[in-house]
Amino acid sequence: MNEQPGVAVAFECPKELKLKLSLETRNCGDVIIVHCQGRIVYRDEAAALSRVVGEALQEARKLVLDLSGVSSMDSAGIGELALLQTWAQRKNVNLKCAGPNPLVRDSTRPYQSGLGAGGASLSGCGSSVVPPRAGLRRLLS
């Protein structure tokens, strides 16, 4: 076998990318619930959330993002929530966030009244959202 010194293998298969965000979608009557577990951060996780919610928006009139399992969120995650809210409004879909932990709730607070950067509004992610189990029951009724 003739090997050339100093030549690296260029086509090595990279390890499979593992998202640190799990998304589960459920239909509950006329409401679609997207359960989020993990982190909503720049690039792959934020893109995965947009892909799943974008698909759900095609069928939903009411959509609930269950954020009770979200452990961290960066500015890209906040921006993604604002984008999803805009998409939902354009499609006349009622989008609500349920069960955000204090970290997520505090991170989104500046954007809840539409005063955030670029006028983005996360009105559905406000501190008025009640804890996850009771909150989902209330939103579904």
Image (cartoon, rainbow, N blue to C red):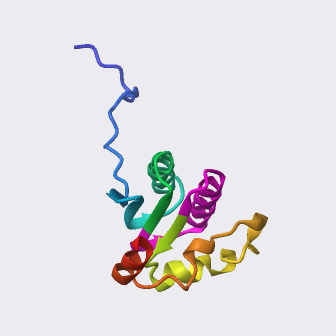
Res 25 → quadrant: bottom left
Q: In this view, does 25 lie above or below 5?
A: below
Residue at 68% across, 69% down: 121
Residue 18 at x, y percent in the picture: 34, 52
Quadrant into which the N terminus falls: top left
Residue at 40% across, 71% down: 140
Left or right for 92, reference 134: right
Residue placed most toward the observer, 23 or 128 = 128
Residue placed most toward the observer, 129 or 74 = 129
Left or right for 72, reference 25: right
Residue 73 at x, y percent in the picture: 51, 70
Res 94 → quadrant: bottom right
Left or right for 38, reference 115: left
Res 69 → quadrant: bottom left
Residue placed most toward the observer, 141 or 21 = 141
Residue at 56% across, 75% down: 125
Q: In this view, does 3 lie above or below 78?
A: above
Q: In this view, does 80 lie above or below 107?
A: above
The answer to whether residue 93 is magenta is yes
The answer to whether residue 60 is magenta is no
In this picture, which residue range is highlighted in magenta?
A: 66-94
Residue furthest left in the image: 1
Quadrant into which the C terminus falls: bottom left
